[in-house]
Amino acid sequence: MKDINGYFHNIFARIYLRLHEIIKMGDSIATFEIEDLFQGKEFSFEKKISFSDVNMFAKLTGDNSPLHMEDQFARERGFKGRVVHGGLLVGCISQLVGVHFPGKNSIIQTLDIKFSHPAYIGDLLKIHSIIDQVSESVKTVIIKLAITNQETGEILLKSKMQVGFTN
Amino acid sequence: MRQEIINKMNTIFCEVFDDDSLKISDNMTSADIDEWDSLNHITLVVNIEKVFGLKLNLSEVGKLENIGEMIELIFKKINL
C-alpha cells in the first residue's frame, strides 16, 4: 500500500512539475496583438554569444567553415577570432519576433538584412527593435531592428522585416 | 493626379515583384502576375499605405477586383 501511495505521489508530482513548466513557458512568451502595437513602440533584449552557441549552430546547420570554427584561420583572414555565423544573429531576430515582440501570435513574412561588422564569441549583443509601420487592414507590422555590440557600440546588423499575425 | 498615382503604384509593383520591366494597367489582376500570391498581396498593401500615407481597411482591400480599382480607391482616399 505504501508503495502504491508513493507511486501515485510520484506521478502527481511529475504532472504538477510539467504543468508548472508549461505555465511558466507560456508566461515567458509575449502575446502582443496588432492593436497593442504602434509606430515607435520599442523592445530590446541582450544576448551574450558563447562558444557553445557557435559550436551548436555549426553542428545544427553544417556550416563548419574555418572562418567560424578555427581561431587561427579567422585571424589570418584579418578577423579578431572565430566569426559568429550571421545565421546565429538571424536566430536572435527569430527569438525577438517569436518570443518577445510581438510573440506567439506573430510570424515573419519578409526579412531584409544588412551585415556591417562581425560578431565574435564572448560579445554581448543588444537586439533593439522598433515598430516602423502598422497595417491593420492586413494584420501586418513593419519592424526595424539593429544588433549592436554593447562594448564597442558598433552596429553589427540592420534589418527590416514584415511580420504578420496568425490569430 | 491619377497618372501620378499610377506611376507610384508602378514603382511599388516593380519593387514588390522584383521586376523593373513590369508595367501595370487598370485591368491587370493577380492572375496576370505569377508571383502575386497572398503574401505579396499583403506586402503590396503595406507598401501602398506607406508610400501614399494612408490607411486602408479590410473590407476595402477585400473588394478590389483589379489594379484599376486599387488606383481608384487610393485616388478617393487621397482626395477625402
Image: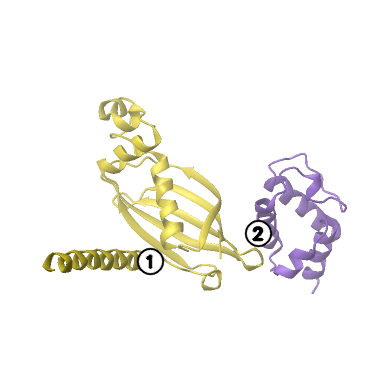
Chain colours: A yellow, B purple
Residue A79 appears in which quarter of the rendering? top left
Label 1: how many residues lie within 10 Å, few (<14), some (14-19) or many (20+)? few
Q: Nearer the viewer, residue B39 or A133?
A: B39
Q: Position of residue A15 (x, y in %)?
A: 28, 65
Residue under mark 1: which chain is it in?
A
Residue located at (41% from left, 62% from top): A100
Q: Which residue is mark 1?
A: A26
| Residue type at numbered disc 2 | Val
Of circles 1 and 2, the one toward us is 1
Numbered label attached to residue B46: 2
Q: Position of residue A1 (x, y in %)?
A: 13, 68
Residue B8 appears in which quarter of the rendering? bottom right
Q: Position of residue A130 (x, y in %)?
A: 48, 62
Secondary structure under the numbered disc 1 in the rendered image: helix
Residue under mark 2: which chain is it in?
B
Numbered label attached to residue B5: none
